[in-house]
């Protein structure tokens, strides 16, 4: 049953308490306090860890991935600007993907100047679950290429930029609405703010945007309630 008043935030670093918002909290792999709400879990490419070995990853991550509230793997990925040693990033990303293959969960991906390297690794490990590039703020050309290759894109505060909305977001929304998600990431705003921006730009009722995104959320993460 469709609840038009629900707003889905598919990646955030705050435990959101906004009315009618269902969010997926980002839990870093070495955190020990497990939230009693929906979350994703993984080792970020910025993290300095005591060791980068599969055994360490398994000890930290498998219990989290088995938790009933864990609905996604991540955020994990590659970062050419701020990440740790590149070869360690690649090892960590591949290891987590291979470990996660037996879990029926999508993966939330952090990518900075490494989109095609990420796609190459997803292909190498034969990843067959949904994969979501979070916080997308790049060009329409890149967005369309990723979407055509089967990726999903999650948009956040880049939607504050009217030029970005008109030149990037609106064209891909109209062509690939079933592959688009919304997030607040590190900003504690209510996700409803971004829903409203989209509705205003499309000149449609807010309920229309809610329905499209809820359908995508349910196909990707299952029923979150």
Image (cartoon, rainbow, N blue to C red):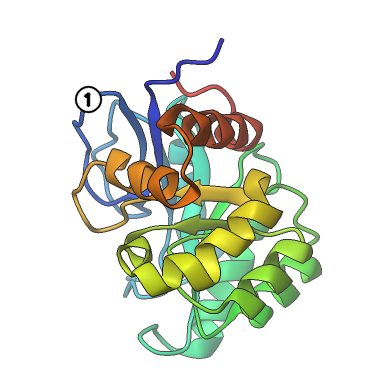
Residue 50 occupies which quadrant of the picture?
Answer: bottom left
**136 or 102: nearer the eye?**
136
Give the side of residue 50 with respect to residue 211, left or right. Answer: left
**97 or 120: nearer the eye?**
120
Give the side of residue 117 with respect to residue 96, left or right. Answer: right
Q: Which residue is mark 1?
A: 19
Residue 215 occupies which quadrant of the picture?
Answer: top right
**Total count of labels:** 1
| Label 1 packing within 10 angstroms: few (<14), some (14-19), many (20+) | few
Question: In the rendering, at what x and y percent does residue 145 appear?
Answer: 72, 73
Q: What residue is rendered at 48% in x and 54% in y?
A: 74
Q: Is residue 110 visible?
A: no
In what quadrant of the picture does the N terminus appear?
A: top right
Question: In the rendering, at what x and y percent does residue 176 appear?
Answer: 68, 53
Q: Is residue 178 visible?
A: yes
Give the side of residue 77 with respect to residue 163, left or right. Answer: right
Q: What residue is rendered at 31% in x and 42% in y?
A: 191
**76 or 130: nearer the eye?**
130
Q: Residue lying furthest top in this view? A: 1
189 w.r.t. 142: above or below: above
Question: In the rendering, at what x and y percent does residue 88 appear?
Answer: 51, 82
Question: In the rendering, at what x and y percent does residue 25 appear?
Answer: 33, 43
In what quadrant of the picture does the C terminus appear?
A: top left
Q: What residue is rendered at 44% in x and 32% in y?
A: 205
């Amino acid at each position: 049953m469709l609840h038009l008043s629900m707003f889905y935030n598919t990646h955030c670093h705050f435990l959101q308490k906004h009315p009618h918002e269902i969010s997926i909290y980002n839990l870093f792999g070495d955190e020990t306090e497990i939230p009693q709400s929906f979350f994703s879990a993984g080792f970020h490419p910025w993290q300095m860890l005591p060791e980068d070995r599969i055994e360490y990853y398994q000890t930290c991550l498998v219990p989290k991935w088995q938790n009933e509230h864990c609905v996604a793997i991540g955020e994990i990925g590659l970062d050419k600007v701020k990440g740790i040693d590149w070869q360690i990033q690649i090892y960590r990303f591949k290891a987590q993907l291979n470990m996660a293959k037996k879990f029926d969960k999508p993966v939330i991906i952090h990518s900075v100047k490494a989109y095609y390297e990420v796609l190459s690794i997803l292909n190498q490990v034969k990843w067959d679950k949904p994969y979501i590039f979070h916080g997308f703020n790049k060009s329409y050309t890149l967005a369309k290429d990723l979407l055509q290759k089967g990726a999903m894109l999650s948009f956040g505060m880049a939607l504050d930029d009217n030029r970005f909305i008109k030149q990037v977001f609106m064209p891909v929304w109209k062509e690939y609405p079933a592959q688009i998600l919304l997030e607040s990431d590190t900003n504690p705003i209510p996700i409803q703010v971004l829903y409203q921006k989209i509705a205003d730009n499309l000149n449609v009722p807010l309920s229309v945007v809610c329905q499209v995104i809820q359908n995508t959320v349910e196909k990707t993460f299952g029923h979150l309630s």
